[in-house]
Amino acid sequence: MKPSFSNLEVIKFALGMEESGIEFYEEHAKNAKGEVKELFLRLADDERKHASYFQELFDNATSNSDSFGYMFDESVTGFFNEYAKSEGFNREQKQINSVKEAIAEGIATESITIAYYEDILKYSKDKTVETLKVLIAEEEEHLEKLKKTI
């Protein structure tokens, strides 16, 4: 039996991904200059908008019901973490010493994120599919912006 993810589970996970993206791009914008700095700041702003959008979706969905507490259960969080690790998020965390390395890491992260969302898409239905397609399109746009800088 394959797992099935609810829209709320996907949104909860997406929030974490977007928050990590904000931190990554803001941190590396500090060491960048010119167009690359502007790109990193725009990408961080995009991630912030995505996070705000997903937080709003989550808040609206959960404000009408108190039956979603299980999503904060340690076993559900553990499942998402283990699934992510099995899909490549446990890459070696190396020190990034240049803007070029930050761009390469951004490209790798966006690529893995897209693949992760596409994999979850296989196990999703209804509104979750729509949400994931929006996420994938946004992350593909980020990937293309980063690729244009190299």
Image (spheres, rainbow, N blue to C red):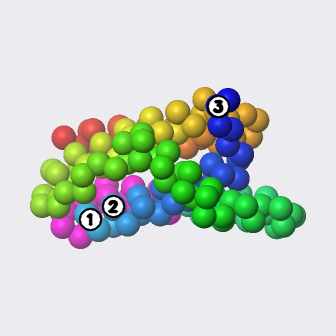
Residue 39 covered by magenta stretch: yes
The answer, for residue 75, to whether it is visible in the render is yes
Q: Which residues are magenta?
A: 29-49
x and y percentages locating residue 83 in the rendered image: 50, 45
The answer, for residue 53, to whether it is visible in the render is no
N-term mark: 1 or 3: 3
How would you rate the neighbour count of disc 2 (Cα within 10 Å): few for under 14, some for 14-19, many for 20 or more? many
Q: State the residue at coordinates (19%, 41%).
A: 150
Residue wearing tag 2: 25
How would you rate the neighbour count of disc 1 (Cα within 10 Å): few for under 14, some for 14-19, many for 20 or more? many
Horizontal arrangement in the rendering, residue 35 relative to residue 49 (left or right):
left
Distance Cα–Cα, label 2 vs label 1:
6 Å
Residue wearing tag 1: 29
Residue 2 - label: 3
Q: State the residue at coordinates (48%, 49%).
A: 82
What element does badge 1 sit on? helix
